[in-house]
Amino acid sequence: MSATSHLLKVVIQTVMAAPMTNDQSWFYALALGVSFLKCLLINAYHSTDFEVHRNWLALTHSLPVSQWYYEATSEWTLDYPPLFAWFEYGLSHIACFFDKEMLVVPNLNYASPATVLFQRLSVIVADVVFFYAVKECCKCLREDKGKDLLGKPSFILTVLLLWNFGLLIVDHIHFQYNGFLFGVLLLSIARHCQNRHFEGAFLFSVLLNLKHIYLYIAPAYGIYLLRCFCFTQSNADGSLQWRSFSVVRLVILGTIVLSTFAVSFGPFIALGQLPQVLSRLFPFKRGLCHAYWAPNIWALYNIADKAFSILGVKFRLLDINKLPKASMTGGLVQEFQHSVLPSVSPLATLVCTLLSILPALFKIWHRPNGARGFLRCLVICALGSFMFGWHVHEKAIMMAILPLSLLAVDSRKDAGIFLMLSVTSHYSLFPLLFTTQELPIKIFLMLLFTIFSLASLKTLFRKGGALLNPLEVTYLLGLIPLELICEFVYPLTVWQKTFPFLPLMLTSVYCALGVTYAFIRLYISLLTCSDTTKKTKMQ
Amino acid sequence: MENWSLFSLCVLLGLTSRWAVSFHSYSGAGKPPMFGDYEAQRHWQEVTYNLPVHEWYFNTTNNDLNYWGLDYPPLTAYHSLVCAYVAKLLNPEWVELHASRGYESHSHKLFMRATVLFTDILIYIPAVLLYCFYFCDGSSKQKVATALCILLYPGLILIDYGHFQYNSVSLGLALWGILGLGLGWDLFGSLAFTLALNYKQMELYHSLPFFCYLLGKCIKQGLIGRGFFQLAKISLTVLVTFALCWMPFLSDPKQPLQVLHRLFPFGRGLFEDKVANTWCSLNVLIKIKTLLSRETQLFLSFALTLLFILPSSLKLLSKPNLWQFKLALVNSSLAFFLFSFQVHEKSILLAALPVCLVINEIPLIAIWFLLTSTFSMLPLLVKDGLLLPYVVTSLAFLFLSLYLLSALERSTEEELRLGLYRKLTRHWLPKLNLSRIIKWKFWFSLVAMAALSFTSVWLEPPAKFPDLFPVLVSILSFLHFLGFIIYFNLVQLMEPQRKKSQKKTN
């Protein structure tokens, strides 16, 4: 309570102190505004993730550490790394002031008003980390003086991050703690931009111990730190100078990372529970695609398989009796059996992911191009794993969109890619909120974010023509009829009963096209951009 | 950024907050046997759909007037009928005669909320946008900021999307009327206002300024000749609109009389519940309700109301411009709220609408008023389970409007319209800094309201005075409103010629 009142005091002072443009008060206004919006969403629909986190609160609160990764009363067992468990443990000490009942493990699906209030508020308050990180990121931007507020890159970036549609609906309606986690990620990126590499590395290793999905972008961090930090100098053409290798830096980095992991996993290693913890963190029993296909390569692969099998049956190339039976209910069953194309194994997805990020890694090794190159490589790692990963959730796309926002306010090419990717993948998040009550709010918020990003980036890059070419515009406009058909027309038709999954499939395939396109464009821009012409901040 | 994108962002923010508030509870949710305004609106759909027009306002076997009988003018009834047709299409159970009484379900709540959103998008929001586009001084950013503040006014959002009513229809129509008059389309303006009046009889609070503005304008054009012709056209428009609205009730003279009887229930007494007006506050000291006869009460309230609206109306009559018109609307609706017979706490929204319209000219006072008006409905909102949205929307409105309109910087004596005051006090108190005093009062009153909100929610009232907190809330808001009516009257009556608003009006 006192923290909030302090924040309010700061805001009042900043508001009272100065007029609109020449200071940072707009940042507080934006942060406060979005926090109020989040507070209004407290009573909105929440998914099973709410119960997941309540269960984790309960089990970290009432069980000894040695039981955390063995407890299985609820089906939502603890599957985040230890630091996140400690985070929940810390929260649980505040939770008991709201409602003690939520901290009892057997109280499954407990959701009293006080519990809802506490859990929602914990997400909202944890976002303070995110606010701070965004503020730090804004400092890394070069600022055009004299422009009006709405055209400033830092203002635009702040809105793109703080008011991000995906974060709002995933965290504050669906329920997760991504804002806080992305806060740590963005802060670590900001630290790298500010040449404070040890802090950056530390923050990233903390992040890995909070949620291990960020392992996907670890290669970018590893290569970047090795290349740009452990090697202290480059040749004039940007290529590697082998003799400038600094062992001290490598050792310090290694110590930082390893000690973070030691603090996090140490107790479990000492208890001899490491295999159990790891088996919880990496469950490979799930299928290739989530129940709702994330818009990636495998969605396209699945649909191609389906198309081939239908065509095959039609032209009598395939025998209908020999096809796997469940294949027509795809989108609802977890295990999708391919009928024509070969089935995909976890190992194959891993190889594909690695192959997809390898050129990017090689590129920043060869010609690092400073913090921008690193960021671009990071986005490609996130996107590559999203495109080819095993059992990817649609939410994972946030890992690419948020860092890409940083690039979008910096160059017009990236701005175009950002628009394509953010609009498409935000739309692909729509099925997360399937309740009628939330239908208007997701449309309003989506329009809000999309209109802002289109209009502001257009203003920012006023010179030099349109950001999107006619084809891209047509594709994006196609989302409107898609939404109308999927959520308004289709439920009224007779097929709703027999093929309820069709709208979801249509959505993920349509969005997969856009995401793939953005991925390819981003790749081209990474491989073709010449580092010598660009003035980099890092070196 | 272009104007259209700014305006659409502002509308979307307004819509988002509206729909987010609608997730919360409504009046009388799960409280049989009477439920609340939500059930009243649903019941009207049931009645208008199933019964013939001539039974709507009468107590019959199928229409129990004691159970949320229709007591709004015909347009509300027609609106209910249209909603009922849609409801029938979606789920016939919602409007089934008798059987649907007290019907509550999640999907029905969604339907009802959607009807509010629909009318809001159709009527109120475009009116606000047009108003800000045409009549706000300053850059386009300033216009958008004003529009955003008006759209985020918590009182209206909480009552329409929380408590459940269709105030955005009547207020929106009145705003269309103001727009029409401001743009010089007098016939359109009077048409829109007549519709507002036929949607909710409380719009009478605004009627005198409308009348005086139009009359004053006609007098200016010369009552013999063009002005008279104009006046005749306006009267004809009003009469025809009225006739059309009341058409189904005109066949039998008993019908309109019964409707009027339903619209003005003098039998219900001087005031009900706790409302922040003079009578309820005075009641703490003297029990007027028992002391005076009903007729005396009626006369007293009528006389006082008239006394308080006359000066501003006469001023408007002599100087019919938009600025005077807006102030007269504030003064008239506040006078009605404070002194007239049978006032509800929600009627403060009628005063809040014109105050919203001066938010760009006198930001600090307008914000103060709007927050007080929301605060005055606190007991109602707490009863409806709307505490969370009340706190959040009020705080959001406070910070956003102070920030966007830079209200605290724009509060010199000149900008607070206290110039004449200054001249008066210069001789006696030369060091007096009125602007600083007002700012301190503003913060002090905000703290008082916050404290009272806090205590009334978290503290148990003493057993002797179970109504202690609602009474305190209404007295505190009453004192504020009394101050505001004096302030706005002074501003209106002492206003020297203002060039900007003069230019805009015809």
Image: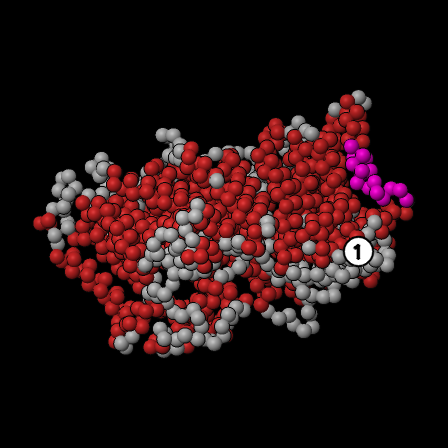
Colour approach in the figure: secondary structure
| Label 1 environment density (alpha carbons within 10 Å; few <14, some 14–19, many ≥20) | some
Residue B310 seen by the camera = yes
Q: What amino acid does circle 1 point to?
A: Gly
In the image, residue A460 lies at what x, y percent?
Answer: 39, 36
Q: Nearer the viewer, residue A473 or A131?
A: A473
Judging from the image, mark 1 belongs to the subunit labelled B
In the structure shown, which secondary structural element does the residue marked by tag 1 occupy? loop
Q: Is residue B313 above or below residue B503?
A: below
Residue in view at x 35 percent, y 56 percent: A343
Q: Is residue A56 above or below residue A504?
A: below
Q: Is residue A500 magenta?
A: no
Residue in view at x 44 percent, y 75 percent: A73
Q: Would residue B266 appear left or right of B33 to someone viewing this image?
A: right
Q: Work out which residue is located at the far top of the displayed protein and give it.
A: B225
Identify the magenta region: B237-252
In the image, residue B490 lies at what x, y percent?
Answer: 66, 41
In the image, residue A497 lies at what x, y percent?
Answer: 57, 55
Q: Quadrant of the N terminus of chain B?
A: top left
Residue, disc 1: B69
Q: Would residue A189 appear left or right of B164 to someone viewing this image?
A: left
Residue in view at x 43 percent, y 41 percent: A453
Q: Would residue B101 appear left or right of A96 to someone viewing this image?
A: right
Q: Work out which residue is located at the far right of the displayed protein and give it.
A: B253
Q: Nearer the viewer, residue B67 or A450?
A: A450
